Image (cartoon, helix red, strand yellow):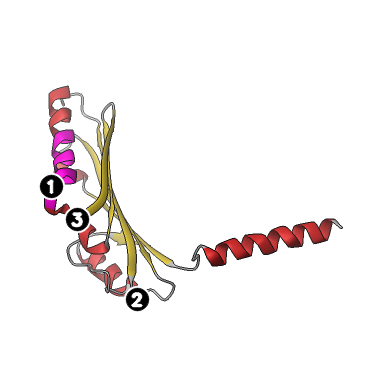
Amino acid sequence: MKNKKYLGLLGLGCGVLLLTGCGGKTLNCEMDMSDMLAGMGNMTAEIEIDYNSDGTEAEKATMTMTVEVTSDDVTDEMIDSLEESLQGECDTEDSGFDSCKVKRDGKKIVMTATGSADSIEGEIEEQTTLEDAKKALEDAGYTCE
């Protein structure tokens, strides 16, 4: 009797996966941009692009930029300015993002933007295959999985 229960739950789980479109592919890339902060801290950019199951069309892209100030020489006004700069990227009319948020926690600022692939990284469009996108991002300095 227990086996039937578990088989039923397993079947239900598989059905949910099929109905939700699971099976797509995801490209994850990251770039360390800390040198742009001139020793004031760490900065990384991460791009995640969700593709259809055969990797031929990008369905959604997310970019996360994380800045963590580690230097004691940086004032709160400088961090405020950095936060405003990132918020300005979100507020730009031609950004093309579906959503964009900037959150600050002390000396750490995180900007998260979602949208189409071409709104996240200029060389990548929705019709760019996963392999071509990976090559373009690696050529731009990202490390991809």
**Mark 2 surroundings: few (<14), some (14-19) or many (≥20) residues within 10 A:** some
Q: Secondary structure at mark 3?
A: loop
Give the label, 2 or 3, closer to the camera: 3
Q: Which residue is mark 2?
A: 56
Depth check: give the residue in front, 84 or 14.
Answer: 14
Q: Please give the residue where the numbered disc 1 appears in the rendered image.
A: 92
Query: Residue 79: x percent and y percent?
Result: 17, 29
User: Could you tell which of marks 1 and 2 lies nearer the N-terminus?
Assistant: 2
Q: Secondary structure at mark 2?
A: loop
What is the C-alpha distance between the residues marked 2 and 3?
21 Å
- What percent of the width, then of the height, locates residue 44? 26, 47
Residue lying farthest to the front in this orientation: 19
The amino acid sitting under disc 3 is: Gly
In the image, 94 versus 46, the foreground residue is 94
- Extent of the magenta region: 82-93
Q: Amino acid at mark 1?
A: Thr
Q: Which mark is residue 96?
A: 3
